[in-house]
Image (spheres, coloured by chain):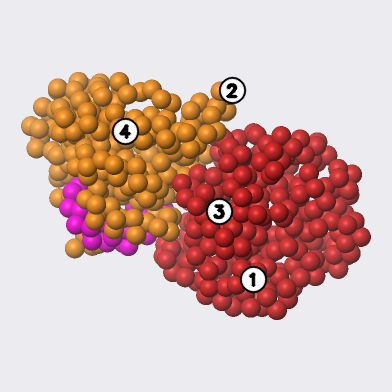
Chain colours: A red, B orange
Amino acid sequence: MSRLSLNQWTTRRWSVPDAVDGCRRHGIEAIGLWREPVAEHGLAATAKLVRDAGLRVSSLCRGGFLTGGSGLEDNRRAIDEAAELDAACLVLVVGGLPGVVPGEPLGDGVSRDLKAARARVAEALEELAPYAAERGVRLALEPLHPMYCADRAVLSTLKQALDLASPHPADQVGVVVDTFHIWWDPEVYDQIARAGAEGRVASYQVCDQLHPLPQDVLLGRAMMGDGVIGFTPLTEAVTATGYDGDIEVEIFNADVWAADPDTVLATMKERFTTLIAPALA
Amino acid sequence: MSRLSLNQWTTRRWSVPDAVDGCRRHGIEAIGLWREPVAEHGLAATAKLVRDAGLRVSSLCRGGFLTGGSGLEDNRRAIDEAAELDAACLVLVVGGLPGVVPGEPLGDGVSRDLKAARARVAEALEELAPYAAERGVRLALEPLHPMYCADRAVLSTLKQALDLASPHPADQVGVVVDTFHIWWDPEVYDQIARAGAEGRVASYQVCDQLHPLPQDVLLGRAMMGDGVIGFTPLTEAVTATGYDGDIEVEIFNADVWAADPDTVLATMKERFTTLIAPALA
């Protein structure tokens, strides 16, 4: 239980102070923060609040969206924020095909050149990794489920994330292992082991996959146990790498967001105890 | 154009005679058949109809659904049907996690053991491959997009399909390369080349991916050019393998099904000419 971290998007209607207080009341020792609510509360105020509460910041979400060839300035700001918050990593969601807007029909000017989009991510990382390193911030490349390849992340597998990270030192660029995004991957156990051997597991996130998927597939994430994912082998594989950092629960789900956040935290703790914790031994 | 094949599900409201007549009127030389409409028209009658029309049967869809540990009897029947139709291959959609029903909420008795489900497919293939070989039928393993891993196919990548096929002779067990299912895969070019080197490309299917995905993600397939996929590099890669068989267009899409099938065929021919044919040289 001491490794459980609340990603604040799971309790999306809570402000930063609400979420920090929720963690305190439920005995949760770490939090994954998002830039937008942090900006709302103020960066310095958030840094002080979490420090005073004794919470670890397991990640800051998120930088990225690099495939369009711009966005470096905003990513540098995100790195600065991660530094001020003393976040264990800055999560990067790299972006989809240029011109493809999540949730909107395709317009003119959409690129279908996946290879070029992927190359642009590697180029942007060349710029950002040294900047992050100077500020003591670790970048965490997050492969997203292939159903988001067009609009959110051309980074689709753990292998691809590790290949992309490989030119950079492991303490500068790591990867996110998120069960929702990678559970289906036939190579996932080899690649988790490789991530461990290379010292690149920057974050472990647990979250289930709804079935059937909802109309907006972005909201297809679910509380552990409410979907199709078997958590034991994945958690055992991450444990075998030696990863002993925080384990975040990040859920985008209309029903979870509509529920009382305190009930969500109680359920989260219970599911973590029954479905995740036994495989951490 | 001589390699263009109409998968009959693209013009789903057409019966077998309608589809055969549509191919004749539009100068299409090959057809991909489905077992249900074939049964409706009669197996022997269908075999005679397509033979008399001079159509090649580029595939029969479909066998599979092997993860539950049953279904072998029905797959043997599908093999017999493919033999009688002289189909170039029998497409196998291997099935999802046992107990997960497409489109329905999770009930009790759902298995989350993905590894076991995958092992069961390999075991079933041991049974079916020799039976198919005796009847001159080639099995074609179809990796499906990972968003269907839970409910339709635990076979998610071309690499996994080739690994699964590898114990069997290439003329007995091949793979389907379907742009919709594999376009996002960072390994896809290496694996298409491997499929070529191993002589296992049994079918090339072209179909786009809608954006955003519709409520039923099964219907996320689209006419080439109406989605996010860049067809040129994929088609060039398949061409480079030496594959010179038929190229099927298989579209599950509510708007395509609602449209006049003759209009769909006219559009299909035009898009094949502009988006696919130039990369076949």
Task: Say what amino acid the circle numbered 4 marks.
Answer: Leu
Task: Say what amino acid the circle numbered 1 marks.
Answer: Gln
| Label pair 3/4, CB-CB below 8 angstroms | no
The local secondary structure at tag 2 comes to loop
User: Would you place residue A93 above or below residue A1 in this image?
Assistant: below
| Label pair 1/2, CB-CB below 8 angstroms | no
Task: Say what amino acid the circle numbered 3 marks.
Answer: Ile
User: Would you place residue B76 above or below residue B30 in this image?
Assistant: above
Give the CA distance from mark 2 to mark 3. Answer: 30 Å
Q: Which residues are magenta?
A: B223-247
State which tag comes first along the sequence, 2 or 4. Answer: 2
Give the CA distance from mark 1 to mark 4. Answer: 45 Å
The local secondary structure at tag 3 comes to helix
Q: Dot 1, crowdedness within 10 Å: few (<14), some or many (≥20)? A: many
Disc 2 is attached to a residue of which chain? B
Give the CA distance from mark 1 to mark 3. Answer: 18 Å
Residue at screen point 18% across, 39% down: B88
Q: Is residue B237 magenta?
A: yes
- Which residue is labeled 2 in the image? B108
- Which residue is labeled 1 in the image? A172
Disc 3 is attached to a residue of which chain? A
Q: Are dots 1 and 3 on a single chain?
A: yes
Q: Which-is-in-front pick, marks 2 and 4?
A: 4
- Which residue is labeled 3 in the image? A192
Disc 4 is attached to a residue of which chain? B
Disc 1 is attached to a residue of which chain? A
Q: Does any portion of residue A149 appear in the rendered image? A: yes
Q: Which-is-in-front pick, marks 2 and 3?
A: 3
Q: Does any portion of residue B275 appear in the rendered image? A: no
Q: Are dots 2 and 3 on a single chain?
A: no
Give the CA distance from mark 1 to mark 2. Answer: 44 Å
